Image (spheres, rainbow, N blue to C red):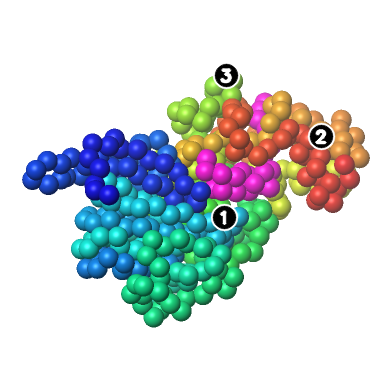
Amino acid sequence: MSTEFGKRLSVRETPIPGLIVLDLPVHGDARGWFKENWQREKMTAAGVDLPDFNPVQNNISFNDAIGTTRGIHAEPWDKYVSVATGRIFGAWVDLREGDTFGAVFTTELDPSMAIFVPRGVGNSYQTLAPDTAYTYLVNDHWSPKTTYTFLNLADETAAIDWPIPLDEVEISEKDKNHPRLGDVVPMPPQKILVTGANGQLGRAVREEFGERPWIEYATRAELDLTSSDLDTARRWRDYGTIINAAAFTKVDFAETPEGRAEAWAANVTAVAALARIAASNGITLVHVSSDYVFDGSKIGAYAAGDPLSPLGVYGQTKAASDAIVSAVPRHHILRTSWVIGDGANFVQTMVSLAERGIDPRVVDDQFGRLTFTRDIAATVRAVTERGAPYGVHNVTGDGEPCSWYDIARDVFQLTGHDPDRVTGVSTEAYFAGAAGPVAPRPRNSVLELSDDGFVVTGDHRQRLRAYLQVSGSPA
């Protein structure tokens, strides 16, 4: 088979998820041929989920003789493989944890073809022509500490039909002694880092994702995001996702000089550091935003793409962090409102007041929907595992918006107390005579919800009932 000239650039999927074959245009005449071996813009726009994988190293393997056989090696990085000269028979085996573990794909490659091999898929080849040069781009630098996963070339389960029998070719002793599929330890996913692991959202994320060897939960004491040595605090190329559940949320304290500094450090400086690391290492950054990025003056629900217009310091820091995160190539910004989780929050305050016989005054001119940290955590998992498009996602409870006064009445009623004990007041009246600074609140915190298959929520007042039952209050 000679190199095919004149093909159009196209990409096609294989039975192994993420393993993608490319047909490359090769232009030739009597003098020889030319091709664009990797053209980022054209290839990532070709119609199949071929990632812009940020290669950092280019390697070439030259093979003198027909039948040179190498592999099967699964590496902890993505790999873009093509043939510069000659022809190969390639075999790929999925050695990642998951339902497709052990899946096999084979094909022949000449200079008019290439293949994208995702992290953890075993790669091997056999040369079918002399003087074959096999070239590949990878998105991590080789290190002696690198951990590979291997499979024996003669594995009976994979049952690869090698064009030249393995007993007739030169194979390294290492490749001859690699384990059979039943003895292979699958390659785990890339690491996930969760910051703010002890906060309300961090605890919910931990409950959602569970304890896995590749998931790391970090508190501020364990990982200072404002530290000057953050860039070297981890081997960041080992991470695929950072879930930033850390944030400064004391909206009134943020209006003080001390609070302003703390808010900017936690919500902006730290996020900027994470964004820099994510962008430099091809990491997906998941960031939780807030309705406070808007001033609340809009009539109707806020869409994900509405212009930001924060009122107070807290809102300004969240808007700044949204702008920073949006510059990361792989990012999800989850915009929430009225967050309720495991810990001190508005609902628990109302429960306590009801039980102690205190009749509260609650603002009745701020409108929105509750968002429960369990639902945010479930959405975090959905967007990271199901391949949501990068960008901003509004994540709040569904259903009819209401005021904080309405929520307070619901809490009283659901916990067996008289809802008429709650008195509705204006925001101005509620904060009149406050001892310290008061942050401006958006009057309209309603976020527009789209049915994109990634927002994991339900009617927020029904979710309130379920929350009170789980938290131990009668409902």
Task: Specify start and end residues of the magenta stretch as a single range.
Answer: 362-388
Residue 15 on image: x %, y %? 51, 48
Label 2 CA crowd tier, 10 Å (few <14, some 14–19, many 20+): many
Between 124 and 58, the one nearer to me in the picture: 124
Residue 273 horizontal/vertical position (percent)? 40, 55
Instruction: Decide if residue 50 is on the left or right side of residue 110.
Output: right
Q: Quadrant of residue 102?
A: bottom right
Number of the label disc, if any, that sits on residue 299: 3
Q: Position of residue 325 (x, y in %)?
A: 43, 45
Residue visible at 64% across and 64% down in the picture? 211
Q: Secondary structure at mark 2?
A: helix
Is residue 437 visible in the rendered image? The answer is no
Dot 2 amino acid type: Asp
Residue depth check, mark 2 versus mark 1: number of the one nearer the observer: 1
Mark number displayed over residue 410: 2
State which quarter of the image contains the C terminus.
top right
Residues tagged 2 and 1 counted as in contact (Cβ below 8 A): no
Q: Residue at x 71, y 52 (%)?
A: 342
User: Which residue is found at the position 87% from the left and 30% from the top?
Assistant: 420
Report the side of 188 relative to 168 (left or right): right
Does the magenta-highlighted stretch encompass residue 373?
A: yes
What is the secondary structure assignment of the residue under circle 3? loop
Q: How many marks?
A: 3
Identify residue type, mark 1. Thr
Q: Amino acid at mark 3?
A: Ile
Q: Position of residue 379 (x, y in %)?
A: 61, 43
Mark 1 highlights which residue? 100
Mark found first going from the N terminus, 2 or 1: 1
191 inside magenta stretch = no
